[in-house]
Image: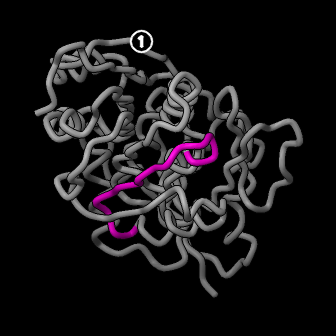
Amino acid sequence: MTWWKIEIEVPSALAEPLAYLLAEATGHIVETRDATTLSRPSDGLEDTSHLVIGLADAPDDALQRAILDVLEPFDLGAAAVRTQSSDDETWRDGWKAFLKGGQMSRRVWVRPPWEAPEPNAEATIIIDPGMAFGTGQHETTRGVMRVLDDVLAARPGARVLDVGCGSAILAIGAALLGSDAVAFDNDPDTLENARDNVRLNACEARVSVHIGTIEAIGEGFPIVVANILARVLIELATPLAARASETLILAGLLHADADAVASAFPDFERRGTLHEGDWSILHLVRVRGAALP
C-alpha cells in the first residue's frame, strides 16, 4: 500500500501556531520536526522547522488549498510544501514515535493506546488520534485541562459542554473526574474518532458526542470549554455565553488575542489567564447578577 506525507518548511518561530492552525484547517495530525527532533539531522534546522502530515491516500485539491490558505497570511506559499509517497509500511506508524503520553493536569494524564499506563496517574485518558486534532500534546489542550481540573476540584460533578471537541479529549477528562459531559463539533469528520475515544475510555454513560452548530445545544451548563481559535470564539460569543451558567474556559488564542476575546464576553469577569507557550487560556466566571440571555 502507498502512504503519503506532506512536509511544510516553516520558520521555527511560527511552527507551533502554524501546526495548530493546519490541524484545525485540515483535520489531520501535524507533526513538528525541528533541531531537537531525533528523527532527522539537526544541521541547519535551528531556525527552520518541518510540519508533517501523514496520509493514507493522495492529498486532494481541497486539502492542498486548505494548507495554502493557512500559509498565505504568513508569506509562505506552495514553494514551502513538499508532497511525497512511499510503499514503506513503516511510514504508516512513523507518527506514533512523536505521540507520547504524559501529565496534562494535576490529576489527569494522557497516553496513546500503544503506550503503557502511568502507575501513579489518578485519571488516564487513552486517545487514539485518528483524524481529529487533540492528542493532549498541544499547549492549548493541556492548558484547558489544567484549568478544568482545578474548576472541577472546586465544583465536583458539574456538567461540562466541550465546544469544538475534536477528539473529545477534554470531555473524556471531565468524565474521568466524575462529571457528565457533552462533546460538540461542527466537523463531521471528528464524529467517529470522538466516539471511538469515548468507547476506548469506557465513558459512554457520561459523555455524549454531537455534530452540528452550537445553536443545536438547547440547554445550559455550569462549565463550557472551547478550544477553537480567537476569531471563532469572538464570532460565537453570544451562543457560548448563553450556554455557560457559571464558567467559561476559552483557548486557541495567542497572548495578543486574550484581551479581545475576554472583551467579547461582557457578562463574565476574568478569573485568571494561564500561559502555555505562545498561547493563553482564559478562565472566565459569570458576573454575579448577570442574567442568562
In this view, the residue in front, 269 or 226, is 269
Crowd rating for badge 1 (residues with CA inside 10 Å; few <14, some 14–19, many 20+) = few
Residue at horizontal 47%, vertical 33%? 11
In this orientation, does residue 108 appear? Answer: yes
Residue 20, horizontal then vertical, whole percent: 43, 42
Q: Which residues are magenta?
A: 175-189
Q: Quadrant of the N terminus?
A: bottom right
Name the amino acid, label 1.
Answer: Gly
Residue at horizontal 28%, vertical 31%? 245
Residue located beneath label 1 in the image: 272
- Does the magenta portion include 104? no
Residue at horizontal 29%, vertical 54%? 68
Residue 247: name its quadrant. top left
Residue 163, horizontal then vertical, whole percent: 34, 47
- Does the magenta portion include 186? yes
Image side of residue 264 versus residue 15, left or right:
left
